[in-house]
Amino acid sequence: MTVIVVQQAINGVVVGSLYVLVALGLTLIYGVLVQINFAHADFVTIGAFAAYFLMHLIGANYLASIAVALLVGGLCGFLINAAVFTPLRSSRSELLPLIATIGVSVMLQNVMLAWLGPIPYAFETPYSNQVIRIAGIFLTWQSVIIIAVATTTIALLYAFMKFTFLGKAVRAVSQDRETAGLMGINANHLIMLTFVIASALAGMAGAMLAPVLVLTPFAGTSVIVKAFAIVIIGGFGNVEGTILAGLLVGLIESFTTQYLDPGLIDIVVFGLLLLMLAIKPTGLISERREENV
Amino acid sequence: MSESAAPLPPALVAGSTWSRRMSLLLAVLAIAILPLLLRDAYWRTNLIICAINVLLALGLDFILGYTGQLNLGHSAFYGLGAYASTLLVTQLGVPFWLAFIGGVALAGLAGTLLSLFAVRLRGHYLAIASLGFAVITYQILVNWIALTQGPLGIYGIKPPPPIVIGSVTLVDFHNLASFFYLVAGFALVAYLLLRQLVHSPIGEALTAIREDEVSAASLGINAAVWKVFAFGLGATIAGIAGAFYACFVGTLVPDAFSITESFSILSMVIVGGTGTLIGPVFGAILLTLLPEILRAIGDLRLVVYGASLTLVVLFMPGGLAQAVYLLRSRLGFRSRGGAAR
């Protein structure tokens, strides 16, 4: 009994830490721009496919493929900011960029569908089958790598935001773009930097999520749904809240699978999100400005 | 969408009474003649799908274009109307039109409840909440197999019963032309009703809310009430579309009501031009027929939808309505009596 609970908790933390990477990207962008990139989760899919083809066509090392997925994700972020968010900045609209990126997401998914087909790809890494057993609990090397990479990345990101000049500048832009501009900070460059970092996290998460996901061109849809739930529960723009909420959603997912039914995951997660919105919608919004990290 | 959609001059939104009557006459004529011109089943089917999509686009446009609420859950109301009206007939043996009303009422009720719940939310938060509602509804349709048969689907749904007087069958809805007249008739009534609403004091209140909720409140407009009203009415119209869809196609599977469907309807509204009623009508027709015409290239329906959504937002945020207006003013045409708003 306890073994199962501990086992599921570990699985939940492993998946949850990847959701954290995806949701952190959304939250960072929301912090500097108060905008949502709906195609964010499709960068997860693109990262996953990039890693898949790198490993299967060239025979690249899995860890190297994760690094490439990170670069591919960053490139996607650069492109979407240049093509959609920068041109729409002058409209000062809250909803137009969201609507435009919904279009990008639909387009990306269906172009991938035409190209790659609807049949799920089996993404296997050499580490999935190497199991460590501690006191009845199984841990694959894959999980160890995920937790190590995710923790390192989150720690580096945290240090970057807290201690480097660029990170402080990003936070300054989040808090007050105009004042930051008066201090000689080029907001456009920092917004671009934020997009590249955020999307690189998504691409990298894709390469590590791929073995868990059903890897089809539509994989991003289920991920974006959970990422939204995480940023709402954690508070948009709030980094610590996002980390906690991401792990929580990972745990909910693994326990729902164990004790209820895998088909109910989205219902439980989004039910929690709606509950959260019902209890403290304004609380989340008012927290945003104070707690940008 | 307060600052977003390019505000269109009143001349485009409302013509003179005379030109309004002319365009109504043209619309009635077009609806009457089209199924007679297009006699094969393929094109008549497309006509019916057009009419259903017009209903969906009108409902969403009323919510998004007139109160600025980005509703990403339209597919859910569409699906609720379809499943509820069908299940009332197949599970409880309710007569068709009563089940129709039941399905439509459930969709409207769901929209009203979601809106009541979400009325404090705005912008992105409402978009995500409505998306959540759509995902939950879809998952329930997939997972409540005892009721909905899940992904296996419900088959053999019958069209509306024929209209019979004595022993003479006046209208048989197995006939595609009759079915088209039925749905297009509803779409026309919905359009006229919404137009009446938009040009009434209610419409002015809604527009005031869209432009600036705080100023509207200072004028004594209860924004919450009208936002809920618009949301409920838009969802009701989506329910009508759903009930017709079910008995037209004859088969229901949850995938017809996934969030992708919400995005398709959003494309029609944006491409046509939010905040005008006539724009989304043409947006729905264009985006229904265009992929059929392009079918030779392959099944690119959703690629077309996605691309047009993005490109229109980037280059012509007022959609077709704005394009037509720009074209007309460039050619020197001006509507008379344009200030009828």
Image (cartoon, helix red, strand yellow):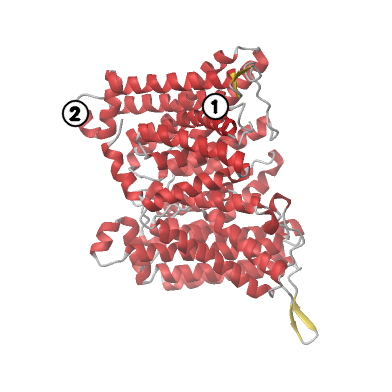
Residue B333 image position (x, y, % from top left) = 42, 58
Q: Which mark is residue B29?
A: none
The C terminus of chain B lies in quadrant: bottom left
Say which quarter of the image contains residue A30: top left
Say which quarter of the image contains residue A153: top left
Please tell me whether residue B165 is drawn above or below residue B255 in the rendered image: below
Which amino acid does the dot numbered 1 rest on?
Gly
Return the residue at label 2.
A182
- Compare residues B205 and A26 and report the one nearer the observer: A26
3D distance between C-alphas at marks 1 and 2: 38 Å
- SS class, disc 1: helix
Compared across the picture, whether B164 is left or right of B11 comes to: right
Return the residue at label 1.
A206
User: Disc 1 is attached to a residue of which chain?
Assistant: A
- Compare residues A132 and B137 and report the one nearer the observer: A132
User: Disc 2 is attached to a residue of which chain?
Assistant: A
Q: 10 Å neighbourhood of mark 2: few (<14), some, or many (≥20)?
A: few
- Compare residues B224 and A263 and report the one nearer the observer: A263
